[in-house]
Amino acid sequence: MVIAETPRLLLREFSSEDVGALAEILGDPKVMEFSTNGPCTEDDTRQFINWCQGSYRDHGFGQWAIVERLSRAVIGFCGLSHVELDGAQEIEIGYRLAPSVWGRGLASEAAKAALEYGFSHCHIDSIIAIIATRHVAW
């Protein structure tokens, strides 16, 4: 199911067919530098996609596949997740993109679409982002 469309991207729900493409991205240490879990294996990626699919069912949102419109390739993920922060339940936006597409403004484009969906379709009042202080754009 397509969640949002931008001039260059589609955000859509993950399917089991996305495991290989996403595993390649999430297995890259550069992509996962700021992740608390580090690079992912193919099995980790399969579990992540299963978790995303459960979130769609349970909450109406989750992390979505970012698909480049021209190539139709999965180039990462962006979406919304439940997190606990300082004892409070929050909704967090997060994303990961393949290094081959870094520096083109695609993360901002995807995040804007995910935020708009969260506020307008899911009626979320507040969405946070947790960012490492040393995480800067390339």
Image: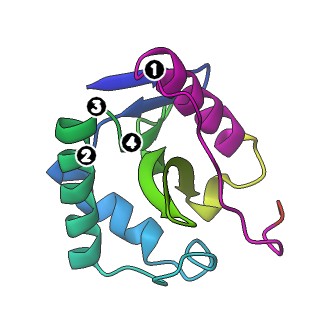
**What kind of residue is marked 4?**
Trp
Q: Is residue 33 above or below residue 9?
A: below
Q: CA distance from mark 1 to mark 2?
A: 16 Å
Mark 1 crowd level (few <14, some 14–19, many ≥20, 10 Å Cα): few
The earlier-in-sequence mark between 1 and 2 is 2
Residue at which label 3 appears: 60
Give coordinates of residue 19: x percent, y percent.
25, 61
**Amino acid type at mark 2:** Ser
Q: What residue would you read off at disc 1?
A: 123
Q: Which residue is mark 4?
A: 64
Q: Nearer the viewer, mark 4 or mark 1?
A: 1
Amino acid type indicated by mark 3: Gly
Residue marked by disc 2: 55
Q: Secondary structure at mark 3?
A: loop
Q: Quadrant of the N terminus?
A: top left
Q: Which mark is residue 30?
A: none
Magenta-colored span: 106-135
Label 4 – label 1 distance at C-alpha: 18 Å
